Image: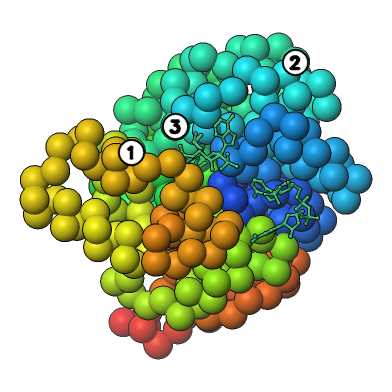
Amino acid sequence: MQNKITTLFKIEYPLIQAGMIWCSGWKLASAVSNAGGLGIIGSGSMYPAILEEHILKCKAATDKPFAVNLPMLYPDIDKHIELIIKHQVPIVFTSAGNPKTWTKHLKAHGITVVHVVSSVKFALKAEEAGVDAIVAEGFEAGGHNGRDETSTFCLIPMVAKAVQIPLIAAGGIGTGNGMLAAMILGADGVQIGSRFVTSIESSAHANFKNKIIDSKEGDTLLTLKELTPVRLLKNSFFDQVQEAYQKCATTEELNELLGRGRAKKGMFEGDLSEGELEIGQVAGLIDEIKSAGEIVTEIIAEFKEAKNLQISDNLNF
Ligand code: NDP
Ligand code: NDP
């Protein structure tokens, strides 16, 4: 497989593991990169010293390219950027912020920059800021999400039509068939998060992984749009948010209810009732915990099989 994305990142398959707070540390990122995809360390949950530890451990565990995801709302972002430059991380995925802020600086240090967007408007802004590629993430995605609720199925062809730079599709993709569908819609590669949360190498708590395996269609919902829109698995904390809405809670009251460290509590410490459990709609399709390498191999095999498939019954009209 060789296309714009494999060439840009110097990887084997156009399959990227999303940077996810509390789930994608060095173990997951290096395992995905070693399997031929692109692994990403999710730095939004890491104090600078922890990020440095994860970068060094990732470098020791793989000689393949890997990336760091920088959510731009992170408070100590300049320290993270210093570390990324110091340790010559080859690729950075920025998200949740303005791509103009850091792209030039990162590129001046020879770093490939990708920005995550949820709309055509932001895709054009990212292209203008000079990023090397875009991740367009649809409404199905877990965790932080766009406000416009554009689904991946609609977003990808519209962004593909609007921009010239390589395009990575995200949101609702967890299988090789999904990967093929996204690429037929115009993407040059895919970014997959939820499926890797349940990998052996993910640093998510076992309780969270098992909860995802047990989840089904309809178990996640996008909420807290007044703060930062986020897709969560329904649980007791989610119910408290719904109750607050029924009581017409103000933004301040919602902020107070959310408190601090909910994502860590749910995803890293395994508190399934009081924690925030960020996961995508595709969770309903995930039914096994496997190694990240097995997941990559399975997705690519399924992709190739689907691509080479003879016309199947449902297409035979
Ligand atoms: P790691 O390299 O995985 O962890 C090194 C440091 O990074 C630790 O300080 C750990 O946090 C932190 N860390 C790990 N993953 C993330 C992440 N995705 N986002 C933010 N911070 C992260 O080394 P080890 O596997 O040897 O684990 C170190 C310790 O972390 C052990 O005591 C282990 O039990 C614990 N751990 C706990 C998990 C849990 O679900 N509760 C999951 C993974 C590791 P911290 O300092 O808070 O442990
Ligand atoms: P909260 O304000 O609820 O909690 C902050 C959490 O981030 C704590 O658990 C804290 O760990 C950890 N943390 C790591 N580095 C720092 C730092 N320099 N200053 C303060 N806290 C730090 O935030 P959330 O849990 O909602 O999100 C945490 C961060 O993750 C956000 O700032 C954002 O950058 C990012 N984020 C990224 C997402 C993504 O990439 N998809 C999705 C959601 C959030 P500790 O408890 O050990 O102190």
Crowding around mark 1 (Cα neighbors within 10 Å: few <14, some 14 to 19, many 20+) is some
Contact (Cβ within 8 Å) of mark 3 with mark 1: yes
Q: Is residue 297 left or right of residue 183?
A: right
Q: Nearer the viewer, mark 1 or mark 2?
A: 1
Q: CA distance from mark 3 to mark 2?
A: 22 Å
Asked whether mark 2 lies closer than 8 Å to ligand 2, one says no
Write down the residue under mark 2.
109
The answer to which of 278 and 160 lies nearer the viewer is 278
- Coloration of the structure image: rainbow
In primary-sequence order, the first of circles 1 and 2 is: 2
Among the 4 quarters of the image, the one containing residue 198: bottom right
Residue at 80% in and 39% down? 53
Check disc 1 and report its element: helix, strand or loop. Answer: loop
Q: Which residue is mark 1?
A: 228
Residue extending farthest bottom:
313
Which residue in the protein does label 3 denote? 96
Q: What type is the residue that disc 2 sits on?
A: His
Residue 289's spot in the image, x, y percent? Answer: 63, 76
> Callout 3: helix, strand or loop?
loop
Q: Mark 3 vs mark 1: which is more N-terminal?
A: 3
Position of residue 18 measured from the top left corner of the image (x, y, whole percent): 58, 49
Instruction: Report the front residue among 317 and 41.
Output: 41
Query: Marks 1 and 2, Cα distance to the nearest angstrom?
Result: 31 Å
In front of the other: 82 or 300: 82
